[in-house]
Image (cartoon, rainbow, N blue to C red):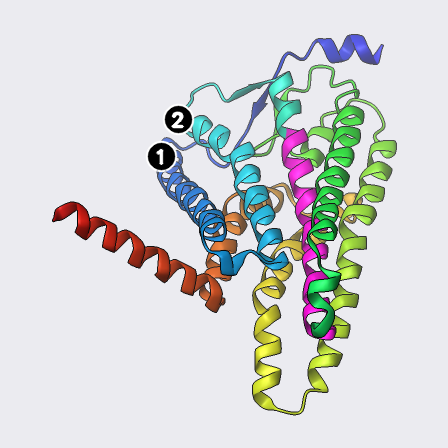
Amino acid sequence: MGTHNQTWVHEFILIGLSRDWDTQVSLFILFLLMYLVTVLGNFLIILLIRLDSRLHTPMYFFLTNLSLVDVSYATSIVPQLLAHFLAAHKAIPFLSCAAQLFFSLGLGGIEFVLLAMMAYDRYVAVCNPLRYSAIMHTGLCCRMAVVSWVSGSINSVMQTAITFQLPMCTNVYIDHISCELLAVVRLACVDTSTNEVAIMVSSIVLLMTPFCLVLMSYIQIISTILKIRSKEGRRKAFHTCGSHLTVVALCYGMAIFTYIQPHSSPSVLQEKLISLFYAILTPMLNPMIYSLRNKEVKGAWQKLMVHFSGFAIKLKT
């Protein structure tokens, strides 16, 4: 019966943020500019890391992965959101909805695990600096990155499969900006306790477990830093971890608030704002955080600008 009911739904209607035309046009312009900044900022970070040999280190290898995840996550949601701002019929086909859920859920999971891997990298850099190169060798970094991508992808496949096996009956209106997991599960016309348990389990595995690893890493990092006698040494050690810690605070905070307790989840408006935070604001801020707080990235950026300035002068002459 569930299968027959599910076949009645060929497309979903996304309610979005507003039905006022002027508001939608204003949001379209704002989010389009933010998305362009996100894409440009993340690709510039990747380009800088590729071009500057001084940035060919484990930290920047993981940062490259983070930038790829951020721009991919934004792309899985924002273009569809922008199109719907200008569309009279805000429909998304069933398969497109499933694909959007798969990619956004998978990329979100990858980012959480990747941030835990980056925390371990910072732990080794601060707590065991003399053996840093020996521990964080290329093979280990690649395996850690693969674990991040594979674990997030496996979770996404499982969650997407069990979510879209639910009979939706004639419920087609998704009160959200995208095909978000909790919003789609709410459409089901049957008991969803199994799905809620699955969401809880995946939250523990891909959210709380990496978060605990980050906490453990930073407890060790802070303990080591406090033992450093010189103020300059402590300042440099804190600066080493500052950018990553800022990104961790941004990424983990709202995700824990949203997914760890599906029964006591935030309001629909809060869910929409949280999704916008992850789809637009966080991917846009991450490159800025690493650029503004990192001397190596700023140095690489200045070197690139000097190179292009010299190239432009040669073309004029």
Q: Check residue 202 in the rendering and tell me which mark sits there, or answer none.
A: none
SS at circle 2: loop
Q: What residue is at 64 percent from the left and 11 percent from the top? A: 10
Q: CA distance from mark 2 to mark 1?
A: 7 Å
91 and 40: which one is in front? 40
**Could you tell me residue 172's position as x and y percent?**
64, 20
Q: Position of residue 313 (x, y in %)?
A: 18, 52
Q: Quadrant of residue 305?
A: bottom left
Q: Farthest residue in the bottom direction? A: 229
Q: Is residue 175 above or below residue 114?
A: above
Q: Amino acid at mark 2?
A: Leu
Disc 2 and disc 1 in contact, CB within 8 angstroms: yes
Residue 18: x %, y % from top left: 47, 35
At label 2, counting other C-alpha atoms closer than 10 Å, the crowd grade (few under 14, some 14-19, many 20 or more) is few
Residue 30 vs 214, above or below: the answer is above
The residue that label 1 is drawn on is 25
From which residue to which does the magenta span run?
101-128
User: Which residue position is annotated with label 2?
Assistant: 86
Horizontal and vertical percent position of residue 70: 56, 44
Q: Secondary structure at mark 1?
A: helix
The residue at the point 69 percent across, 81 percent down is 225
Give the amino acid at mark 1: Val
Residue located 69% across and 29% down the image: 184
Q: Is residue 241 left or right of residue 155?
A: left
Going from N to C along the chain, the mark reached first, 2 or 1, is 1
